[in-house]
Amino acid sequence: MDPFSAEGELLNMHNAFHQGQYQTVIDSDTSSLSASNALPARVLQLRARLANGQAEEVLADIEGEDNEPDLAAVKAFAHYALGNTSDALSEVEQLVSSFPENTAVQILGGTVLQAAGKSEEALGLLTKHQGNLEASETPVLIVTDQNRTDLALKEVQAARRWAQDSLLVNIAESWVGMRVGGEKYQQAFYVFEEMAQAPGTSATKSLVGQAVAELHLGRLPEAEAALQQAVQRDANDPEAIVNSIVLNVLTGKDTSELVSSLQSTAPNHAFLADLEEKSALFDQAATKYAAKVAS
């Protein structure tokens, strides 16, 4: 049985992780867990520490434990988090070759493969999962990034058939819904707003989700309020910064300080790479219309 399913003893930790309540996961008491769930719980806590920017500490914690594929997958993901994509990719490829059925290898390895531009390899790896909810939902993020909304909807609907009202499925469905548009914007807003405003589940991640839904709905003041709450919780959260940049563009405000902040906190963020690419394309196009001096 998937230990993160509705019947599993790691459900609360799993939900907290996907709500972005990383410190709650880190602080969870795992002493009473069954022996079979000790390692999955440790991996989840290590991932929460990675999400909190503690990659160096995580690497030190698991040093010498590479013989355990779950922890080797965490090591590879830590290298990716530190910007060592080539090292991370090499480690993941070795793990995929030796342990393709391992859930941690599938989820963390699939994420690294996707980040390295190997989307099809990532999807191929994740299809090997054996009833693990997170492994079944990770492809949704991949095909959504590829703008393959039809496939993302199929993945969510397939998971919904056996996961019912899982929080992770609700979150995935909401992100896909914001690609679909229309009434799906409001449905996504309800999901994220419920998480963001409830004291027991509120986190930077859910506040950003609420803000993105507000942006799609054209409710800019409400989006700004949600982003301000997110930044108050974590001024260095990359997604809060990125969406604050988007908000400032829409409201005609300067973005230079926010862009500088993102460059400092997350220099490898995809938004910066996209911004650089678009700026280069604009400059290239502008040269075609440069003013000519009359002779």
Image (spheres, helix red, strand yellow):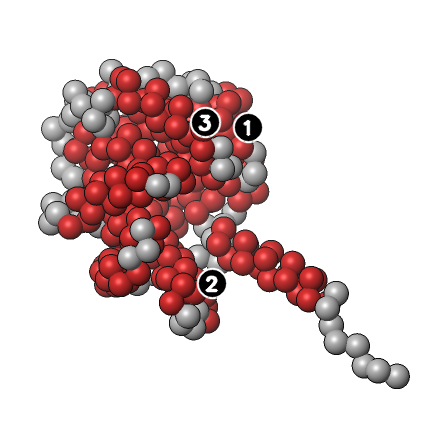
Give amino acid for label 1.
Glu
Which residue in the rendered view is the most extreme toward the right?
295
Whether the residues at callouts 1 and 2 have beta carbons within 8 Å, the answer is: no
Residue at horizontal 47%, vertical 44%?
80
User: Where is mark 1, residue-wise?
Assistant: 120
Instruction: Name the image quarter holding the N terminus.
Output: top left
> Label 2 neighbourhood size at 10 Å, few (<14), some (14-19), many (20+)?
some
**Distance CA(mark 1)–CA(mark 2):** 29 Å
What kind of residue is marked 3?
Leu
* Residue 235 in view here: yes
- x, y percentage for residue 20? 26, 45
> What kind of residue is marked 2?
Gln
Q: Nearer the viewer, mark 2 or mark 3?
A: 3
Q: Which mark is residue 263?
A: 2
Please name the residue that numbered disc 3 is placed on.
151
User: Residue 62 has which mark?
Assistant: none
Position of 9 with respect to 276 (left or right) is left
- Which residue: 40% across, 23% down? 154
Q: Nearer the N terminus, badge 3 or badge 1?
A: 1
The residue lying at 54 percent from left, 54 percent from top is: 274
Measuring 44% from the left and 36% from the top, which residue is drawn there? 144
Q: Are marks 2 and 3 in contact (CB under 8 Å)?
A: no
